[in-house]
Amino acid sequence: MISISFVPCNNGLGHIRRLAFFVNKIKKKGKIFFFVDKKKIKKFKLKKKINIRYIKSNSLNYINQIFKNKSLNNSKIIVSDNLIHKKLTLKKTILFANFLWEEILNKNKKNLKILKNKNIKIFSNYLFCNIKEKIKIKKIGFFDKFRPSKKNNAVLIATGSAQSRLLKQFKKKIIDLIKKDRFKKKRIYLDPNIYSNSLKKYSVIKAKFTKKMYSEITFAMIKPGLGTVEECLIRGIPIVPIMNNENKEFLFNSRILKEKKLGFVFKNLDQSVNFINKNFKNTFFLNKFRNRCKKLKWNGEKELISYLNKITY
């Protein structure tokens, strides 16, 4: 019986979301291991046949915990979402990556040589691939299929899980806008990084990033990581990128969103909120945006499954 290990990067939820969606689509018999933080995987449902190996996310040795694990070392295939380690060269490996941490953070460039190994097949989103290293990359569509919501009547404000000086500045400004009713009494799903119970009286709800929550969103003000971007585009939700100066990944993603008319970039939060208020009930604008999303390439996971089937035998 063949064994496969799935190893998502632990930053944010996007990497885990992608591999959780992918692993649930696999119909093959075999032993499947999924390495993940216990708290984060609660947001996603995995099939009962999948063996979960919990990793302590606050550990400095997160990657080593995974790649020293006996279950992974006994696996024949590794499926990684943006985790690079020398052991990837010893197995048949599927690596999904739109960017490389080594390039974004300008360190550990030696790891990039690993990616040229013949055992590693690299896949990336066809719009958001921001990899400078000269390596072979198979570009694929977004995961899942387009399924717009019909009940949207709220605004999502999502900042991601990382703490930073930029987040503190943003938090102060966005709370001020909420208290001054700049969103004109719209319901707001607010990131847990910013939310407090004192904001309930302003129609603010703590964002849990569930399917139900996303089904109620009309506009999304988000830090543009691919995971949240994908969740919005699946449902035809217009994106207003925020905090996009935090690193090169978000700057690049914001530029692509703007170029493809999938996102609307403004100089400051006041302009962003004015744009949302102006178009919140503009059915012509919203329908046009949804049609644009519908024409994107979807079901990218099918190409990963096809390749996995190929290397399984």
Image (cartoon, rainbow, N blue to C red):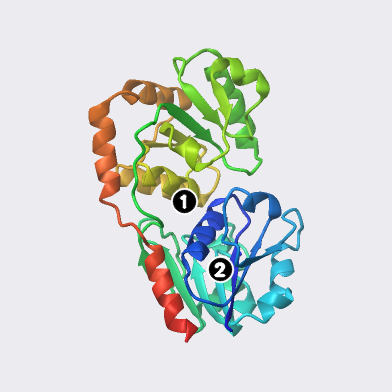
Q: Amino acid at mark 1?
A: Leu
Find disc 2 in the rendering and name its residue.
Answer: 80
Residue at the far front in the pictured view: 48
- Residue placed most toward the observer, 312 or 156: 312
Find disc 1 in the rendering and name its residue.
Answer: 226
Residue 312 image position (x, y, % from top left): 49, 82
Give the CA distance from mark 2 to mark 1: 16 Å
| Image height of 68 relative to 275, above or below | below
N-terminal of the pair, mark 2 or mark 1, is 2
**Left/right of residue 226 with respect to residue 175 in the rendered view:** left
Residue at the far bottom in the pictured view: 313
Q: Amino acid at mark 2?
A: Ser
Q: For residue 48, which quarter of the picture?
A: bottom right
At mark 2, the secondary structure is: strand
| Image height of 306 relative to 57, above or below | below
Residue 83 image position (x, y, % from top left): 59, 66
Please state the total of marks drawn on the protein image: 2
Residue 8 image position (x, y, % from top left): 59, 62
Q: Which residue is painted at 37% across and 42% down in the image? A: 235
Residue 94 image position (x, y, % from top left): 50, 73
- Residue placed most toward the observer, 138 or 73: 73
Q: For residue 101, which quarter of the picture?
A: bottom right
